[in-house]
Amino acid sequence: MKLIQYTFRKLAFPLLIVMAVWATAFYFLILYEIDDETNDSLQNYKEIIIKQFLSDSTALANHPDIMTRYQIREIPAKDANLSEDVFYDSTKYIEIEMEFEPIRVLRSNFMDANGKYYELVIETSTLEKEDLIETILFSIIILYLVLLVCILLVNRYVFKKSFRPLYTILDWLKKFRPDKPIEPLNNDTPIEEFAILNEGITDASKRSSALYEQQKQFVENASHEMQTPLAVCLNKLELLSENPDCTQEQLTEIADIHQTLGGIVKMNKSLLLLSRIENKQFADTETVSINAITKKIIQDFSDIYEEKQIKISVSENASLKYIMNESLATILIKNIVKNAFVHNIADGEINITISENTFSIENTGNCPELNKEKLFRRFAKQTDNNKSTGLGLAIVQSIILTYKISITYHYTGKHQFVLTFR
Amino acid sequence: MKILIVEDDRSLREIMIRSLEKERYVVESAADYQEASLKLNDYDYDCVVLDVMLPGGSGLTLLEELKKMHKKESVIIVSAKDSIEDKVTGLDLGADDYLTKPFHLAELNARIKSIIRRNQQDGEINIELANITVYPDRHAVYINNEELILNRKEFDLLYYFVTNPNRLISKSALAESVWGDYIDQTDSFDFIYSQVKNLRKKLKTAGATPEIKAVYGFGYKMTDEE
């Protein structure tokens, strides 16, 4: 979600609540005000009617007007209550309009000079509440929509004007790569916050470039520091083995050490490869043909694992081409195919299917379904094959993370890995 | 044949000297940039084995200097850096070969021989061992002047044996040399056994005098003495 959408949503919802509360309050306020006014006018009217009635009791007994009607009737003394006026809402059928209209009623008692008690009922047409609610609701909705549009426009304007430095920084950050020289960030701004951000980001990127450089140096140095002593050990053993005084037992021991050391050498190389991939040191890309790479690799592995007599089938439904680093493509396919050979059984099977954007490989094997969670972790070996380094699939993982490639693992009697190239 | 080894690690330097002296080369060594620079200025060598990271400067700078002096030395870079960019940089500067540490002594041997042969002989280049003659450039093998047909892998194995005669070669060195990167993490080297067996049979049938002997658990040795 973009910042502008986010702020808009964050404003729209509270505004809706505020408007609803306001509409309700407004409705009751208006209603109260109207009732109050009607009551006042009814009261005034009552004073006038009573005064006229007392001066001439025959003149104004009833008055059937449309807007205001009143009736006066005599009541027994015990029912009379002179101290209180009663107001209430009611409805009356109006023949002209052919419907019930709301009315406000005042009921009051009074006494004439003869000591007779009368009841006066005054009715006046009043406001229709439904109409009022409808009007208020309608105007509030209009107001809400108008406000939203205003907010949207103002937001747009504000974002475009005052957040320009932010977007400049974002564009610059998108282009930033620690392994490439840093472009100057041209982003002059009078706004203090953005100036601080400019400074912070420039500093951080410089630091991260420096760290990247240091790490690269460290990888190279670590490589050098490890490889030379390893070379010394390996070569000393080779010289020792050529010594004619060596007995057969000693040679066997030397061979053992030599092979173990070879394992360490390979592990060291794999670890260095991993850090190089993770440091994105394989930057050059070209269009590689996965089909061609696969065929070459299959040929070489078939030689090496000849004694396993594995049946290999490659079905190419399409030519799979992908833009990536060529060495990485080879390492990726090599590691996956190698797994299928190494963990296979004698007289087993390997089936490879290449389609337009997937590379699928399945192989027979001794071990049951593998734990998907641990599959791509470093040194998380799930077989007791002590000659594997436990880094093969970790290397695969780090390569696919560099590109838009995904990998899935299924087990249906055979182990199946599917690479999807996007 | 004079070889200069430029390597700052004392142990590795001494091992390389001992190994190359077995091949009857005259071997000299330099431990840092200055020493190497002086020796390269004052003497001529047939081959220089050059480490890249040296105290006092880079081996690559040394290589540039060497090329500026228009000297004919062949150069093999021996480096712990094994990225493609490093290799390309080294070869672009005029190195003849690039070997990544750690390496097998047999491999170093084979590379040095191949380079010296390329630079010194005119016409067709071959290697002879007793009655075996190998033409590396056209992958041909003759025994008593009769051609022996070998497949690609068998030829690679034989080539490695004839460049390292009478030396014990470990299975891993053979595997890495013949199958390259593919045996990177391979568990067993059993596949070498059957390949060597085939090669041995073919050599014997063709009447080759040098023999490939298995040294149990370790590897193989080609001997040309009766």
Image (cartoon, grey):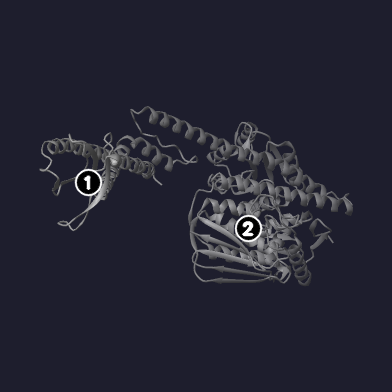
Q: Residues within 10 Å of mark 2 (few under 14, many from 20)?
A: many
As displayed, is residue B57 above or below residue B188? above
Q: Which residue, given by chain and number where applicable, does mark 2 sit on? A: A335
In which quadrant of the rendered view does residue A151 lie?
A: top left
As displayed, is residue B107 above or below residue B34? below
| Identity, as a three-letter code, of the amino acid under mark 1 | Leu
What secondary structure is found at the residue carrying circle 2? helix
Asked if marks 1 and 2 touch (Cβ < 8 Å), the reply is no
Nearer the observer, B28 or A215: A215
Q: Is residue A27 left or right of residue A342?
A: left
Q: Is residue B199 left or right of residue A11?
A: right
Rendered location of residue B208, percent (x, y): 77, 67
Nearer the observer, A53 or A219: A53
In which quadrant of the rendered view does residue A212 lie?
A: top right
Rendered location of residue A26, percent (x, y): 29, 40
Q: Residue furthest front?
A: A114
Nearer the observer, B99 or A265: A265
Rendered location of residue A247, percent (x, y): 89, 52
Q: Which residue, given by chain and number where applicable, does mark 1 sit on? A: A127
As displayed, is residue B213 above or below residue B147? above
Asked if one can make out residue B45 in the rendered structure from this viewpoint, the answer is no
Q: Residue at x 81, y 52 (%)?
A: A255
What secondary structure is found at the residue carrying circle 1? loop
Q: Residue at x 50, y 55 (%)?
A: A404
Chain for mark 1? Answer: A
| Identity, as a three-letter code, of the amino acid under mark 2 | Asn
Asked if one can make out residue A177 in the rendered structure from this viewpoint, the answer is yes
